[in-house]
């Protein structure tokens, strides 16, 4: 068999080896964050806003048997019934899709407390807050993502930072993410996907730097 | 004709190289994810319009479903691996493989309809239970089935390498093989021709391909079917699920045609007859192993 033919055949087989490890999301969420301090230079709460996409919002309302007229408006009673739906039953190990790294390590966030649920233009928008006790760090890296990538979170909502802090948002670089996902360890290893969750690599990143307290 | 095929094959190989070696797949994935998000929003709008009884709402919903299927398939997917891999690994006419791609996409839609209606009517399952079942049980089953098809292709290729070895020593210079595989002068056959091999395996292969893809329903189709069932719009939802399948089929058919073109282009470089006949089982083994490896990886991810 001519060498050229062998090369051609290997090229066409190589072209098949698509990036198979990639998941694709089914829920899209816009995330907003607000950092609240105690006024003494300490972080007190992180407030999280999640705005769900239209289809998933519709699905949730119908799961709960709400909004029977389908106008995507809720009565007061319906809102009261639904509030906290996305905070109940967090699976074990689920960290609320929010990860804050500082020089001193990962910030530990307390259990979520529901604040509100509104319907905005056909979207369910929920707010909750989580306690945190730490000094406002000099720098922190904030990422909001679902490790399993079932939901794609975009940090395009409002970001309110402590006084004296500035933030720089970097969108996820999906091409780089794909490459990283493909190169993670050896897919032949049995626990490859148990230990590696891809969502992290599709996450937007907010780099926050704060002036030292005077 | 051979030159045209070769040019086509080189172009497809180039596109594949761009996709996977130079980050093109990332761009496509991003474009597909954006498209999926947009169509997901549009689908919600279509459902609202349909529920409100607005004129033209059904057409809008079907159009959106088609686009959703298309974008969904343009992202990563197990169906394309199998259809593409089969097209490269086994000698199958482009039209037949395209029909198989279409059939598997529609069968996948049928699975979604069956799951949702069995789920709500017979088993009284909640929405998370149904989508969870699809993700945790049906997806791994499909990947496992695809890996088995790949393994089967590889085994078949290996068996053909084995059986194509001359069983007894005779001098090929002294007789001539007719196109039907008959040896004109010695009166016996040295094995099935390429065309016969393709014929014999076609129905069984067709069932395997379609079945392996169809076991796993698309989550988007489940969302649509569950919503339309709850809204009392069953017919629109079922039509939407099949339209989604048609959108998906556009992509898998493109993959099928590309795979066959690529393969035939590569084969046209080989000396006709003997060279091609010897290369065929080797390609089949390699493609089969590749399908099995990729599906096995997906299976591990899903377990």
Image (cartoon, rainbow, N blue to C red):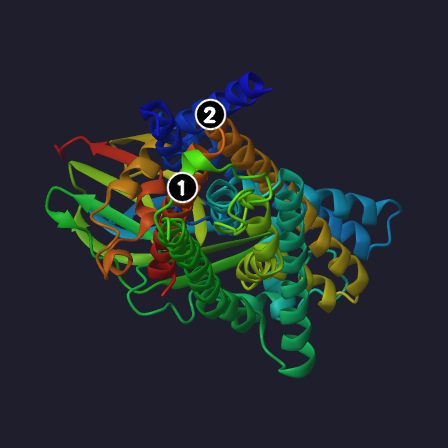
| Viewer-nearest of discs 1 and 2 | 1
| Relative image position of residue A83 (x, y in whole percent) | 52, 65
Q: Is residue B1 above or below residue B229?
A: above
Q: Nearer the viewer, residue B182 or B42?
A: B182
Pinpoint residue A59: horizontal percent, then vertical percent: 62, 61
- Name the quarter where the N terminus of chain B is drawn: top right
> Going 26% across and 51% down the picture, which residue do you hit?
A187
- Mark 1 burial class by Cα count in 10 Å: few <14, some 14-19, many 20+: many
Q: Quadrant of the C terminus of chain B?
A: bottom left
Chain on which label 1 sits: B
Q: Dot 2: few (<14), some (14–19), or many (≥20) neighbours within 10 Å?
A: some
Using the image as rendered, state which of residue A213 and residue B301 is in the foreground: B301
Residue B18 drawn above or below residue A36: above
Residue A202 location (% of width, % of height): 36, 41
Mark 1 lies on residue:
B283
Please name the residue shown 30% across and 42% down the image. Answer: A182
Where residue B116 appears, x then y in whole percent?
A: 65, 70
Image point (23%, 49%), residue name: A43
Q: Chain of mark 2?
A: B
Rendered image quadrant of residue B238: bottom right
**Secondary element at tag 2:** helix
Question: Which dot marks residue B15?
Answer: 2
- Kindly report the distance in space between the C-alpha atoms of the residues bearing marks 1 and 2: 20 Å
């Amino acid at each position: 068999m001519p060498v050229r033919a062998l090369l051609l055949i290997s090229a066409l087989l190589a072209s098949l080896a698509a990036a198979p490890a990639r998941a694709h999301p089914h829920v899209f969420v816009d995330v907003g964050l607000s950092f609240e301090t105690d006024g003494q230079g300490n972080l007190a709460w992180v407030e999280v806003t999640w705005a769900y996409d239209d289809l998933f919002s519709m699905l949730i309302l119908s799961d709960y048997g709400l909004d029977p007229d389908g106008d995507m408006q809720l009565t007061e009673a319906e809102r009261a019934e639904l509030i906290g739906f996305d905070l109940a039953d967090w699976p074990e190990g689920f960290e609320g899709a929010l990860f804050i790294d500082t020089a001193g390590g990962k910030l530990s966030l307390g259990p979520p407390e529901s604040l509100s649920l509104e319907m905005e233009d056909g979207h369910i928008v929920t707010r909750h807050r989580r306690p945190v006790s730490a000094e406002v760090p000099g720098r922190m890296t904030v990422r909001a993502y679902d490790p399993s990538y079932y939901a794609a979170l975009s940090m395009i909502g409002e970001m309110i930072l402590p006084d004296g802090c500035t933030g720089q948002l970097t969108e996820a670089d999906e091409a780089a993410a794909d490459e990283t996902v493909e190169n993670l360890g050896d897919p032949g290893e049995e626990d490859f996907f148990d230990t590696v969750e891809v969502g992290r690599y599709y996450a937007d990143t907010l780099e926050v730097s704060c002036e030292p307290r005077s | 004709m051979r030159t045209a095929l070769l040019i086509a094959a080189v172009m497809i190989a180039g596109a594949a190289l761009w996709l996977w070696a130079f980050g093109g797949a990332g761009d496509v994935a991003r474009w597909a994810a954006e498209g999926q998000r947009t169509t997901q929003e549009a689908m919600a709008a279509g459902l609202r319009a349909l529920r409100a009884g607005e004129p033209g709402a059904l057409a809008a919903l079907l159009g959106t479903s088609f686009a959703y299927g298309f974008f969904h398939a343009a992202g990563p997917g197990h169906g394309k691996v199998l259809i593409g891999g089969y097209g490269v690994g086994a000698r199958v006419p482009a039209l037949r493989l395209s029909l198989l791609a279409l059939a598997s996409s529609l069968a996948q839609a049928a699975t979604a309809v069956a799951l949702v209606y069995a789920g709500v009517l017979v088993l009284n399952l909640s929405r998370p239970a149904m989508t969870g079942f699809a993700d945790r049980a049906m997806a791994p089953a499909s990947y496992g089935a695809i890996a088995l098809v790949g393994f089967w292709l590889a085994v078949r290729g290996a068996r053909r390498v084995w059986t194509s070895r001359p069983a007894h020593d005779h001098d090929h210079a002294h007789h001539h093989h007719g196109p039907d595989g008959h040896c004109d002068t010695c009166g016996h056959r040295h094995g099935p021709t390429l065309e016969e091999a393709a014929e014999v395996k076609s129905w069984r292969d067709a069932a395997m391909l379609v079945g392996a893809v169809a076991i796993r329903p698309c989550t988007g189709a489940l969302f649509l079917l569950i919503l339309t069932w709850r809204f009392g719009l069953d017919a629109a939802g079922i039509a939407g699920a099949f339209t989604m399948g048609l959108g998906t089929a556009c992509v898998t058919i493109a993959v099928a045609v590309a795979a066959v073109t690529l393969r035939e282009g590569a084969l046209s470089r080989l000396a006709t007859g003997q060279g091609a006949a010897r290369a065929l089982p080797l390609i089949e083994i390699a493609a089969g192993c590749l399908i099995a490896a990729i599906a096995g990886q997906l299976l591990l991810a899903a377990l």
